[in-house]
Every structure is written in structure tokens, then in C-alpha cells.
Amino acid sequence: LLVAYVDAINNGSVPTISSAWDGVTATECKKAMKNAIEAFRVNLSLLEMPLDSDDLTKALKDAEASATAQYKRQAMGDATSKYEAELQEKIEEEKANVRKQNRAVSKDTCDRLLQTLFSELIQPRFSDEKNSYEDMQDFAREWVKFREKYLERAKGGAKLDCLLAFSETKHADAMRLLLSRQEDKFEKKIRSLEAEAAAVKETLGAIGGREQIYKQQIESLQHETSEVMSERAKYAAELESQQHTIEQLKTKLAKESQGKHEIDIEKEQIALQLDTIRNHKDEKESELEKVRKDYERLMKEKERTDLELSMAAGEVEQLKSGQKCGCVIQ
């Protein structure tokens, strides 16, 4: 502001506060724009290219938002909008350059990845006769694996274009080579079949004289077969008869088994009855033993009673004898 005043005085004009302030704010806005652009470039330099389109768009959007926010913090005055628009133009230019750079890096990386995967997955089977491609379907399956592996690892906006360009050349070359090898294989097989056909023809000519012998042998075999079939029918009839006899024996055995089962049941019932009788017998014997013991006890009591009665009778007799003789018993 002081410099603006001094310049106005030196030029012979009257300094005004508004014009001086506009100059100051314009200077600050330019400085803020420069700092924001520099910050935007620093953020972009930290990107690890190549990036997929979505990832790159997000990174550019974040860097732009950060640069715009930084500019708004530093800018001041009426010139803010003007220089913000200029900032957006410069950011768009930087974004376009970054997209071009990312695509270039993506193309270089994808081309190298395609060559590497082709050398690892596709090329070896063309040089290995034992593990070579059997047919077009086999090659198509391997090519699908190659493409899926590439899409899994490739990054950047150029990955599809690189794959398309690579496929137009390498896939076509591989198909031509495979067709050529298939044709060679078919020709070898045809020659082999022709040789086998000639050998078979020669063999048929050699065995033409033995056809009659084979015919006689066939007739003999047919006769023997007829006899064998007759014997077989005879054995089948005998087998059927024996089978019928076996069925009859099985039926008889089943009936005998049923009768035996009924006898076993009857035996079990008789055994139960015997057990019941034995139990009753034991109970009766127990009661009889108890009665016998009671009888013996009563007999002993009777003997004791008889003895007591006998003794009492003796005493009575003594008493009677004493009364007759006039004795007094004290």
C-alpha cells in the first residue's frame, strides 16, 4: 500500500485509498493463485502412476479441492473471483497434462505386462511338443486365462486399448501358427491312415485263401455251441427240479419249526405249572413244619401239666392220708 502511494505521488497524481487497496489485493490474489497451483502440482507429483480412471479422477478431485481451499484462505478483495477463475483454468490444464502422462505410463506398463504374460503363459506351449495345444478350444481356454490375468494386474486408462492392439497381432499370429501345426498333424495322420489301409488291404489278400478254413472252423464251433446249448437246457431243467425240491423241503422245515415252536411254548407252560406246584408244596411243608413244632410244644406243655397234676394228686393223697390219721400239718 505504501509503495502504491509513493508511485502515485512520483507520477504527479493524487493517491487514492481504493486504487491502492485494489493493487494490494490483486497482488495477494496472484500470490495465492501461484501457491495453490504449486500445492496442486506437489500433490500430483505424489501419485503412483499408472492409475485406473476412477482412482485418477478421485485423486485429481481431492488435489483440486485442496488447492482451491488453500487459495480461498489466502486470497482477499474484489479480485478473488477473477483469479479463482484463472486458477481453475490452470488446474484444468494441469489435469489434462496429468491424464496424458498417466495414459502414457499406463500404455508403457501394459505393453510390458502383455509381453511378460504372453511369454509366461502362451508362448511356452508353442515350443513344447509334449505340452502343445491340442486344438483351437485348448488355445482359446489358455488365451482367456491370459486375458483375465492381464486385466487383473493392468492399470490405467490404456489397458483395454493395449489389450486390443496386442490381441489383433499376437492372437492372429498364434492362430495362424496353430492352424499350420494342426494341418501338419492332420496330414501326418492321413498318411498314417493310408499306410494302415494299405497294410490291411495286403493282409486281407493274404488271408483270402484261409477263408474256407475259417468257415469250416466256424461251422464246427456252431455245432459245438448247439451241443453246449442242449446240455445247458438239460442242466437248467435239472436245476429247476432241484429248486422245486428245495422249496418243498423249506416248506416242510418251516412247518416242523412251527410245531417245534408250539411244543416249546407248551413245555414252558408245563414248567411254569411245575414251578407253581413246587412253590405250593414248599408253602405246605412250611405250614406243616410249623404245625409240627406247635404240636411238639403242646405235647411238652401237656407232659409238664400231667407231671404237675400227678404231683398235685400225690400231695392231695398225702393230705387225705394226714386227715385220716389225725395229723396236723403245720
Image (cartoon, helix red, strand yellow):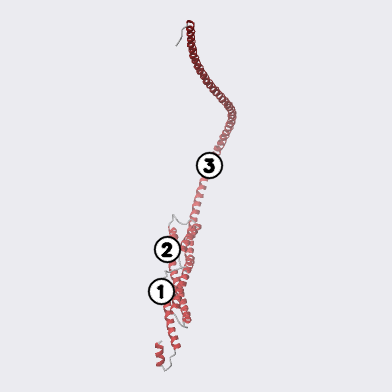
Q: Where is mark 1, residue-wise?
A: 42
User: What is the crowding at mark 3: few (fewer than 14 residues within 10 Å), some, or many (at least 20)?
Assistant: few
Label 2 vs 1, first from the N-terminus: 1
Q: In the image, which is nearer the foreground, mark 3 or mark 2? A: 2
Provide the secondary structure element on which disc 2 rests: helix
Q: Mark 3 belongs to which amino acid?
A: Gly
Q: CA distance from mark 1 to mark 3?
A: 98 Å
Query: Quadrant of the image for the C terminus?
Result: top left
Residue 91, horizontal then vertical, whole percent: 46, 76
Q: Nearer the viewer, residue 155 or 37?
A: 37
**Of label 3 and label 2, which has the lower sequence position?**
2
Q: Earlier in the sequence, mark 1 or mark 3?
A: 1
Instruction: Give x and y (percent) for residue 172.
Output: 49, 64
Name the residue located 51 percent from the left edge and 47 percent from the top edge. 200
- Which residue is at a point 50% across and 51% down the rendered structure image? 193
Mark 3 element type: helix
Which of labels 2 and 1 is toward the front?
Answer: 1
Q: Amino acid at mark 1?
A: Val
- Pointer 3 residue: 209
- Near mark 2 (Cα within 10 A), the count class, few <14, some 14-19 or many ≥20, is few
C-alpha span from label 3 to label 2: 66 Å
Q: Amino acid at mark 2?
A: Thr
